[in-house]
Structure formats: structure tokens, C-alpha cells
Amino acid sequence: MKNIISKPYSAALIAFLLFLPVMILNTIANHEIEPFFTFFKVGASGGFWANPIGYLAIIVCLLLLPAGAVIAIRPMVQKKADGRRRLYLINSILAAIMLVFFILISGVLITDTPW
């Protein structure tokens, strides 16, 4: 019996669904969509304790990115019945995009956060 994550198209769909919260939070932050922007405002004076919901949302969304990348890559590392592995282009591109976003956003947050 096959797992749903071992199928390449469903793995790509699940990975994309894990990528959606990052896109939604980014859209809310860029366009300052109210009333959500007041909950997710990060970088205000006071740091984490001034707005813990925003920081926790960013941390959760950032941790979803590598999880989605692993799910997207999983069908490529499994051997098929003939003992060979296949390259699924959509899955590899999606995993690469998710890892690049994770690295870039994490780097920006680490360098811009006053410790």
C-alpha cells in the first residue's frame, strides 16, 4: 500500500499547501491588510513581548518551509519497483523554491532582529 506522500503529485500539492501560510503572511504584511496586520506586526518597539503572535506565526511558517521541501523531495529518494529513482521536475523546483525562501527569510530575520 502506497503512502499519499510517496505519490509525486500529491506530495507536490501537500508541499504547496504548506507554502501557502508564508504567502498569506507575506501578502498581509506587504499590503497591510487590516485587521490581520495588527496581529502579525513584527518589528515594532518592544520586540517579542510586544507582539508574540506575529513572531510565533513567522516561526511556525518558517518551519513549514523545510517540512514542505522534505515532503516534496520524498518521492524522488524512494526507489521504484525496478530499483531506480525518478526525477520529478515539479517536486524538485518546488523544494528548491521553498528552501531558498527559508534561507532568505531566516537570514533577513536573523540579521534584522536586535538581540
Image (cartoon, rainbow, N blue to C red):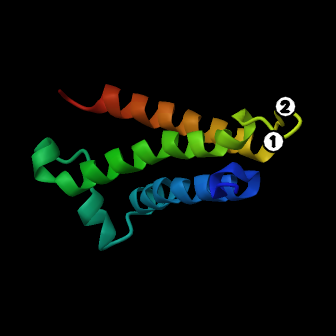
Work out whether mark 2 precedes mark 1 in sequence or the reverse, and give the earlier one. 2
Q: Which residue occupies the extreme right position in the image?
A: 82
C-alpha gap between disc 2 and disc 1: 20 Å
Q: Quadrant of the N terminus?
A: bottom right
Q: Give the percent coordinates (x, y) of residue 96.
A: 65, 35
| Residue 5 in the image, given as x and y percentages of width and height | 64, 52
> Which secondary structure, mark 2?
loop
Query: Within 10 Å of the Cα at label 1, are there few (<14), some (14-19), or many (20+) other Cα atoms?
Result: few
- Residue 89, disc: 1
The residue drawn where x is 22% and y is 57% is 53
User: Which numbered marker is on residue 69?
Assistant: none
Instruction: Look at label 2 and name its amino acid.
Output: Gly
Residue 84 position by quadrant: top right
Q: Is residue 4 left or right of residue 25?
A: right
Mark 1: which secondary structure? helix
Looking at the picture, how far across and down is residue 15, in whole percent?
Answer: 60, 52
Q: Which residue is tagged 2?
A: 83
Residue 64 percent location from the top left of the image: 45, 47
Q: Considering only vertical position in the picture, is 18 above or below 75?
A: below
Give the left or right position of residue 38, taking residue 3 as reference.
left
Q: Amino acid at mark 1?
A: Leu
Question: Which mark lies nearer to you, 2 or 1?
Answer: 2
Residue pictured at 29% horizontal, 58% vertical = 40
In this rendering, position of residue 90 left or right of residue 72: right
